[in-house]
Image: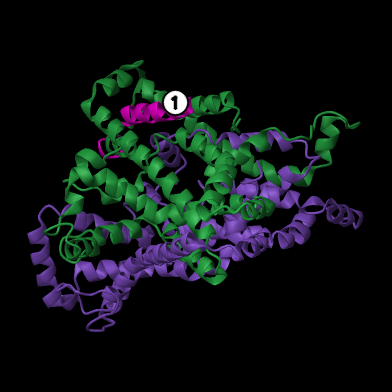
Amino acid sequence: MAQRRFFKATRHHSGVGDYLFDIFNYTFLVLLCVVMLYPFLNQLAVSFNEASDSLRGGIYLWPREFTWANYEHVFGEASIVNSFFISVLRTIIGTLTSVLGTAMVAYTISRKDFVLKKFVTVAFVLTMYFNGGLIPNYLLVKELNLLDSFWVYIVPGIIGVFNLIVIRSFIEGIPESLFESAKIDGAGDFTIFIKVVLPLSLPVLATVSLFVAVYQWNSWFDVFLYNSSSANLSTLQYELMKILQNSNASMSGKTAADAFANANASANMVSPTSIRATMTIVASLPIIMVYPFLQKYFVKGLTLGGVKG
Amino acid sequence: MQIGSKIAKEVINPSVSISTKSKKSFFQRMMSQKALLAMSLPFLVWLIVFKYIPLWGWSIAFQDFKPARSLTDQEWIGLEHFKFLFTDDNFWRVLRNTIGMSTINLVLGFVTAIGLALLINEIRHIRFKKSVQTISYLPHFISWVVAASIVSYSLSLENGIVNIVLVNLGIIDEPILWLGKEKWFWVINGLTEVWKNVGWNTIIYLAAITMIDPEQYEAADIDGASRFQRIRHITLPSLKPTIIILLIMNLGYILESGFEAQYLLGNPMNLAYSENLDIYVLKYGMSMGNFSLATAAGIFKTVVSFIFLFTANHIAKRFGQPRLF
């Protein structure tokens, strides 16, 4: 609303300076979008281009010799297919448990009469300011027998304090009368949580789900730290990370890497470059397809309480 | 993360006091809130196990920790590891890299995000504005692995778009192996960080801008203010509280220069400038098995961060600016 009035006010004010400013501004922002988008479109083009042909260079926005071979190769690799399923699984289970758990705690600390409201809130918020650190966390996971297990992806991060506060602020905005009438109807706190709070909090739950799902899908460090000796628990990001590390390590001996790539390319019709581009697309496409639709929600979620002070 | 800690202030001091006023005893009230207790206590246990117990692990920094022995059967050696740390050349090198990169990230991050927010705000064409925002958020959502893969491909010697553009513009004569030039690493890291997060970081500023009273702009219009004058005298001053809050919080993270970018873009050729404190901890701790030394380095990081946060907060207080706590 405020925005619209602002535009109206500015419309009848235009001089040469303003005109030049607009030209500069639009040009700059278009260039910015190109810088943001080009690398993805380029990787997309490379992933659909014949591997041996890609090594000649000159692939920009469109494949020169179109092929599905890179994708066939990637999805023909049992370890990569398995890592894809692990990624999907941890994203789904991790998001569901985290959002439900966080919402549950958020509801309890939003109840003004809850005896432990302050204690629980402070206990959670304090953890934003310190962290045991890498080694103590590793030793804890080891002591709990969570090494080389799927649950190390889910349990240690089940509640995010930032998400907790965002959801709590939202629940506090729900009119108190709704809770009271539910109570008069004989509903307990758990029923109120399920039947009143969850349905009314859908916008903020969508936001938090996006945050958690992105975090889960993108994680690779916990795989590296806790599960690197269990190949069947590897994730897509970790597989891509290993490919990237190999090409980084071989950077100093660039010619050797190229020779390898070339030999490989003519033999198998794949090359590290093409595999990397294909994996990059596979590992980022699910998120790229989802986030624009949730933009309205996450912008609101991020600014919830953020600008108040 | 950033915004979270700001809200923390308001969370720690809730206006409603819980202990008094109620006629029922604490125990009676507790008994009537079984459902609420059942919903929060399991997570409180989780919190203690996963967030508070690891603090006890700090003690291994003062021990000659041997993983083979049990946790209670370790030898105490006092500050030996800290002494080693402060005499280790590698430690000072990674500390220099950490501070160097986080300073660059801080300055670059702030300037670009505020600048971009101001530019986006001046766009009157709503659909263009929305598209720019959506596209600029894109790199934030992809993993650092994907980002690092894209960056190293874009910077590569032969097909890298950066070299192609720079050579064609005549800025450089021949392609440069950017990730092999150790002195360039801080800049590359900073620009990568900007590419990934600048769009996302504008969200908070754009939200703050919508809170500005439009009458201020109308008044400026009547006075014949130009676009630049309006930005300088209305928009920027209105953003000041937001900027200061974010600045304080980021100063607290001065030793958090990030980990993933440096780890994933690092290679043997740029190691001298790409390794930071987190990688040092990882190297000594996980690769070399020196858990005690790595923990000592981690403690150093946390303590210094705390000092920075409190100092920044204190300075903000003295200048009568909004602060965290």
Q: Which residues are magenta?
A: B285-308
Q: Is residue B244 visible?
A: yes
Colour chain A is painted in: purple
Q: Which residue is mark 1?
A: B303
Image mark 1: chain: B
Q: Is residue B298 magenta?
A: yes
Residue A267 falls left or right of residue A99: left
Residue B100, x across and y down, in percent: 31, 36
Question: What quarter of the picture does the N terminus of chain A occupy?
Answer: bottom right
Q: Is residue B124 magenta?
A: no
**Residue at the spot 24% in from the left edge and 47% down from the top edge:** B266
Q: Residue at x 20, y 67 (%)?
A: A272
Residue at the image point whose x is 54% and y is 60% from the top:
A210
Which amino acid type corresponds to the residue marked 1 in the rendered image?
Val
Q: Colour of chain B?
A: green
- Magenta residues, dominant SS class: helix
* A7 in relation to B258, above or below: below
Instruction: Tell me: residue A131, above or below residue A284.
Output: above
The residue closer to the viewer here, B107 or B140, is: B107
Residue B95 position, x and y percent, is 30, 31
Can residue B45 be seen here? The reply is no
Q: How many marks?
A: 1
Q: Toward the viewer: A185 or B307?
A: B307
Residue B240 % position (x, y): 56, 40
Residue nearer the viewer, B35 or A98 = A98
Instruction: Give the quadrant of the C terminus of chain A.
Output: top right
